[in-house]
Image: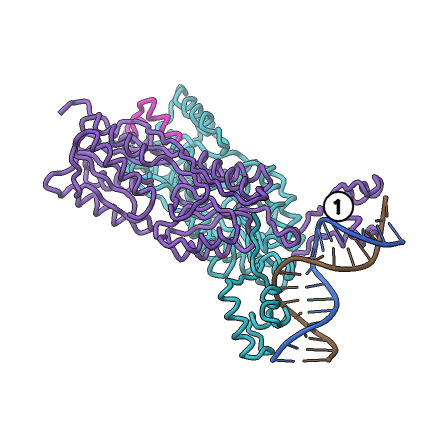
Chain colours: A purple, B cyan, C blue, D brown
Amino acid sequence: MNFKAITITDIAKALNISASTVSKALSDSYEISAKTKQIVLTYAREHNYRPNPNAISLKFGSSLSIGIVIPSIQNQFFAQIIDGIESVAHQEGFTVIIAQTHESYDMEVKSIQQLTHRAIDGLLISQSSETRDISHLKQLRSKGLPVVFFDRVSEQIETHKVVTDNFQGALNATQHLFNNHYRKIALITGPEGLSITKDRLDGYLQAHAQNKTEVTTSYIKHCSYTNNNVEEITSAVHELLELPDKPDAIFTTSDTITSTVLLSLNKLDIKIPEQLAVVGFTNSSFAAVVDPPLTSVFQPGFLMGQKAAELLLSLVKSKKAVTEFETIVLPMQLVIRESSYRSVKL
Amino acid sequence: MNFKAITITDIAKALNISASTVSKALSDSYEISAKTKQIVLTYAREHNYRPNPNAISLKFGSSLSIGIVIPSIQNQFFAQIIDGIESVAHQEGFTVIIAQTHESYDMEVKSIQQLTHRAIDGLLISQSSETRDISHLKQLRSKGLPVVFFDRVSEQIETHKVVTDNFQGALNATQHLFNNHYRKIALITGPEGLSITKDRLDGYLQAHAQNKTEVTTSYIKHCSYTNNNVEEITSAVHELLELPDKPDAIFTTSDTITSTVLLSLNKLDIKIPEQLAVVGFTNSSFAAVVDPPLTSVFQPGFLMGQKAAELLLSLVKSKKAVTEFETIVLPMQLVIRESSYRSVKL
DNA sequence: TTGAAAGCGATACCAC
DNA sequence: GTGGTATCGCTTTCAA
């Protein structure tokens, strides 16, 4: 089975003219007569001619495509980011290639190797939660491949970055719980070592400081983002509820953590928000229909994707080296629903 | 900013040997002496040499990559399919390129044009809901590009296909409602003209026939799958509830329809399942934590992706033309929860 | 054991 | 206005 597409040489032979004439006619060069253009164009259209992208890429050293490296496509937030990236990239004539790391450092390195070496003109990346050493990215940068970080960024590298205001988001969510008279606020969050985890933890701590409340370290739980984290999260919930001084609220900082926590609490028949308030992070449309409707922090994924793509394409198109980099911080939105509201003051 | 990667010619010059020698050494040819191989390999490794994929693709007319065309990445079901495809493709050394149609026929045609013409070795596609004319796909096939359909398939073309048993899934879901003594079962489903819509409708009808119950045509609502279908779905719910003889159950056949219907019912303060039972289609992990836990049909997305990728790669690798095609039908799973259970017989 | 040359598809410079 | 030819990076005969 062989897929043979029509080439410029095919057209040239068929019309008994030279390949270079065909090429010029196709690109509407001023050198070619209207008549010839007409003939070539008609033939090309009829035979559904499309230039071979590999030949173009080889010739120009540019592929008109950008790579995206994300932890997982299953995460709604990242899916929304991809949509945002595509909306910008397609408009500029760029194709997008997506690679998933599934939160593995090795997969991240491998994916990037696959994507690079001229197969892409630029790279957009949100690091895996396992990644500590980023020499593989520094290397790319030093070879001149434009790279833009989004969401999970590293301070070890200087380039354009787009993040959400994780500190503010966590601060607002926690403060909202304080406002509703919760004082014993547990936090179930992602793995340590990730920029977003640190910022969210800082927001949580800042809210406690603002409210002159001491932080109970046993209320803070870190969970991985891997596929098998359901057990981790479930036992975190159990541990919290077995504490002598049980928390009266839980703040969860990812879609998976949120849904898993809700499921655990459901199974334990714990009433929300009467027995326990919950505030989550989620980009899922189900937040409004869970029991009870969930107060949650919404991250502007689509916008983040757009911004990141714009920055990357500006780098790709820039002829001279860029030395001034910017970090865009997008606000998060706290959507208040019923899972965190207590009508009776304690 | 220019990303210049190291090439075979660079290595040849640096080591003062010819390019062809380098090429052969790199591919461990028997023609090359162990000593030369050693030198070349070491130099290549040190300088992080990677062959230019565009040159390879141009040379061999094969790109070791496959294209995936899906309606939307935001849909959890399709995200799971992609994971399944990748798990197989990566193992075989293939890269995956994803294109979204956002349910638009024009986007589908454009995406496919982008992907094809030697940029990919094969194509996996789930059609947009707008697509009727599939001449753009037939053309590819006739040119010899291997194509495998999944989920949303067309009978107008003969090739490998992977589908879920939509008929059985809808039959079981509807029969389950009958078993729980619901008789006035509404159906909110996707647009007409889609294979999956037809099969699901047939299952729904078959259940009615089995139970010797007449079908009320006003209970059947078709909605689009586009971005702005929330209003459509919402008004479908309202129309159903304004019927003189209101339905006592609703069967929804997609993730978006399900979450939107639940939200509408929530706003209208309708008790599930007391006033109205709901059975949905969903691949979201939130199904278990909505109010009340949702009985739903789960589609084996990951498996579907794996099967489709296996079929495609078998076509890609086959040297002779394949004329015998198969259609794999995967069973669906009905997960029974509380949204469809009535304790009191009427 | 090594190297020179052709070719994959498209473009651009230079002749004519 | 048109056509020949070199070029992008790599592989593969074929000659040395």
Residue at the far front in the pictured view: A323
Placement of B320 over or under A321, stated as above or below: below
Can you tell which quarter of the image residue A288 is in? Answer: top left
Q: What residue is shown with label 1?
A: A44
| Magenta stretch, residue numbers | B260-276
Residue B273 drawn in magenta:
yes
Q: Which quarter of the picture shows residue A239?
A: top left
Residue type, label 1: Ala
Front residue of B226/A343: it is: A343
Q: Position of residue A200 (x, y in %)?
A: 29, 38
Q: Chain of mark 1?
A: A
Q: What's the residue at 54%, 56% (across, down)? A: A117
Q: Residue A325, how many percent across, how many down?
A: 46, 40
Q: Position of residue A311 (x, y in %)?
A: 50, 39
Question: Is B225 in front, or is B26?
Answer: B26
Question: Does dot 1 land on a helix, a strand or a loop?
Answer: helix
Q: Is residue B149 visible?
A: no
